[in-house]
Amino acid sequence: MVQSDTQRRSLHGQWSSRLTFILALSGSAVGLGNIWKFPYIAGVNGGGAFVLVYLVCVFVIGLPIMMSEILIGRRGRRNPIDTMRLLGEEEGGTKRWRVVGFLGVIASFLILSYYSVVAGWAVAYIFEGASGIFVDTDAVGVGEIFEELTGSWVTSGLWHTLFMVMTVFVVARGVKQGLERAVRILMPALIGLLLLLLGYSMIEGNFAEGVAFMFAPKFDELTSEGVLAALGHAFFTLSIGMGAVMAYGAYLPEETSIVATSFAVICIDTSIAILAGLVIFPIVFAYGLDPAEGPGLIFHSLPIAFGQLPGGTVIATVFFLLLTFAAWTSGIALMESPVAWLMESRGMGRPITAILIGTIIWAMGFLSILSFSALADFEFGWGTFFDNLDFLTSNIMLPLGGFAIAIFAGWIMCANSTSDELSMGVGRRYGMWRWFTRFVAPVAVMLVFLNAIGVI
Ligand code: PFF
């Protein structure tokens, strides 16, 4: 007998309002992905053409999958593993769907272990920036500052530790006292800081060139790997395909509209990625730096420019503060689903669970840290250990997780359950969601995959 969601309660409570849910979910979505990763992968994949493919992936594949994840989470009201097990049994007669939740929880561990390392650099750069160290420092000098940080596992490890402590601190306090409070302060602050930087970049940067770079499509520079990167990034930036959204959906009040909130979150996330590009590229171009420099774009190129700009010390500090806030609200989301799972399955208290999971992830993080020092020359698969983690999670695990979630919501769950959660009845709008979830999203994910591995 299918139990309706009204009878289920999450152990962890509920979001206080629809706005808090939007803030929490956009806090999860907006992170290093928007400010660090999006500009540099757009930079190396031909700018505008990549942006276009990315936008298509976000709206055509990301939106229906995000809606599916939230509705699954709210219907199950448990952590992703148990929600998938429970709904799998109710809707499809098998508990095996829990594997999807399980892979998602593993992805959370893997992602947070390297995410926290980069977030640690962001925290370190708040202090570097404020110290005025970049002022009049040339490219070589700025390169040395970055090398000193990343090349020393002790220094990098300390900043990574600090970031993990910040994240554990919030998650340990729970949904209302921890997660909600953090996003209510950090998200508005983040938007304020970003707008401030945008104004600055319009005045001091080469804005026209920045805009042209982001929006003029150079299709000849876009390869099939670039298309896969756009797809992987769409999943990564929206935090979908791994149960993080499902975990947040489990705390969503019944009356909140899933359609409207998903749409709002996707628009916020996309706007912030584009605005971040419009802050970064005009500054990069104003100093004749290379937009395709890769992962070092904001830690290496940008500080060279900050060192030359009027008020650069303040601007550098503000920029890395913004990056830290964004990473923090995402780190919290990455920890929530493993923590919820362990609490629910072992009956453990939240603070101890958060510390335990945080410690495991913290320890794993050292493998990524060493990828920039002792293990820098140890390359396999897609590069260093760090590169492999990034590629495996963003470009493989998340799209596959998203594919499975779409199949589950579109084909396994019965139309009554999904239309009930989406409160859409069975009208045209519901029909569209179902069509995108059953056909468009899974087929598109498969096509990009097959294309990237050279089958088509
Ligand atoms: N969406 C985050 C970003 O763009 O930085 C990364 C992320 C956070 C992925 C939370 C997955 C997740 F569960």
Image (tube, rainbow, N blue to C red):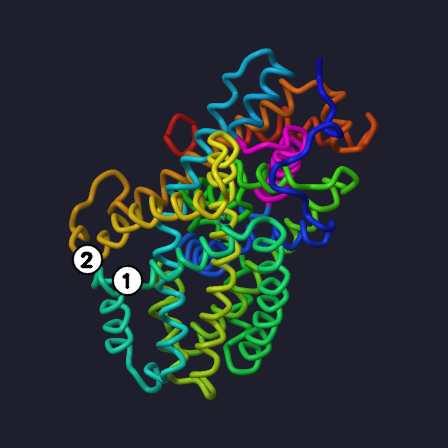
Q: Is residue 310 left or right of residue 175?
A: left
Neighbour class for label 1 at 10 Å: few (<14), some, many (≥20)? many
- Asked if residue 167 is positioned above or below residue 100 in the image, the reply reads below
Could you tell me which residue is drawn at 24 percent across and 47 percent down? 384
Residue located beneath label 2 in the image:
373
Q: What secondary structure characterizes most of the magenta part?
A: helix
Q: Nearer the viewer, mark 1 or mark 2?
A: 1
Instruction: Tell me: is circle 1 under 8 Å from ligand 1.
Output: no
Magenta stretch contains residue 73:
yes
Q: Give the amino acid type for the residue marked by disc 1 in the picture.
A: Ser
Q: Position of residue 224 (x, y in %)?
A: 42, 39
Q: Secondary structure at mark 2?
A: loop
Q: Name the one closer to the observer, 257 or 217.
A: 257
Label 1 vs 2, first from the N-terminus = 1
Q: Quadrant of the N terminus?
A: top right
Could you tell me which residue is drawn at 40 percent across and 39 percent down? 393
Q: Position of residue 205 (x, y in %)?
A: 50, 78
Q: Position of residue 172 (x, y in %)?
A: 50, 51
Magenta stretch contains residue 354:
no
- Asked if residue 306 is positioned above or below residue 440 in the image, the reply reads below
| Region of the chain picked out in magenta, as a range | 56-80
Q: Which mark is residue 309?
A: none
Q: Is residue 50 visible from the viewing direction of this image?
A: no
Neighbour class for label 2 at 10 Å: few (<14), some, many (≥20)? some
Q: Give the amino acid type for the residue marked by disc 2 in the picture.
A: Ser
Q: Name the one closer to the observer, 311 or 344.
A: 344
Q: Name the one closer to the observer, 263 or 179.
A: 179
Q: Are marks 1 and 2 in contact (CB under 8 Å)?
A: yes
Quarter of the view holding residue 369 = bottom left
Q: Between marks 1 and 2, how big is the CA–CA gap? A: 10 Å
Residue located beneath label 1 in the image:
156
Q: Position of residue 112 (x, y in %)?
A: 40, 48
